[in-house]
Image: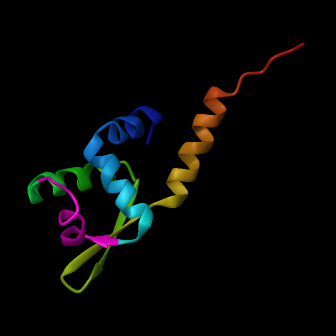
């Protein structure tokens, strides 16, 4: 996944809210829907985009899917952004 793809996934305010929720704890779709003001189909669409960007992952728990942040990918993104912004200055 490129930084462009990652930033594209992060560019939507609803997806940012989903990530904020998942920073606090793992959640099911139902739990997230109760805290967001979007429809279930819209939530599913945003979750799909975040999954394709590898920013979140889901695991089955009975009939529910429990979502969590993919911290290793977020760490990698952070490192890449830092490298991108690092300026080498000679005095």
Q: Give the residue drawn at x 18%, y 66%.
A: 34
Colour scheme of the rendered structure: rainbow
Residue extent of the magenta highlight: 27-38
Q: Is residue 89 left or right of residue 4?
A: right
Q: Position of residue 86 (x, y in %)?
A: 69, 27
**Image point (90%, 13%), residue name:** 91
Relative side of 3 to 45, left or right: right
Does residue 52 show up? Answer: no
Which of the image's four quarters has the N terminus?
A: top left
List x then y, in percent, for residue 47: 25, 56
Residue sitting farthest toward the bottom: 62
> Is 31 included in the stretch rendered in magenta?
yes
Between 25 and 54, the residue placed more toward the observer is 25
Q: Is residue 7 left or right of residue 81?
A: left
Residue at 51% across, 51% down? 74
- Vertical arrangement, residue 56 with respect to residue 26, above or below: above
Q: Name the spot of residue 4 as percent of width and height, x first.
A: 41, 32
Q: Which residue is drawn at 23% across and 71% down?
A: 31
Q: In which quarter of the image is residue 39?
A: bottom left
Q: Which of 21 and 45 is in front in this view?
A: 21
Give the residue at the far top of this rendering.
Answer: 91
Q: Does the magenta stretch include residue 20?
A: no
Q: Position of residue 43 (x, y in %)?
A: 18, 55
Q: In the picture, residue 24 is in which quadrant?
A: bottom left
Q: In this view, does 59 lie above or below 85?
A: below
């Amino acid at each position: 996944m490129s930084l462009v793809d990652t930033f594209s996934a992060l560019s939507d305010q609803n997806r940012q809210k989903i990530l904020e929720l998942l920073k606090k704890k793992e959640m099911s779709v139902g739990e997230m829907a109760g805290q967001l003001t979007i429809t279930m189909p819209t939530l599913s669409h945003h979750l799909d985009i975040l999954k394709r960007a590898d920013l979140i992952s889901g695991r089955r728990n009975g009939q529910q899917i429990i979502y969590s942040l993919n911290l290793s990918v977020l760490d990698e993104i952070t490192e890449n952004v830092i490298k991108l912004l690092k300026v080498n200055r000679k005095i």
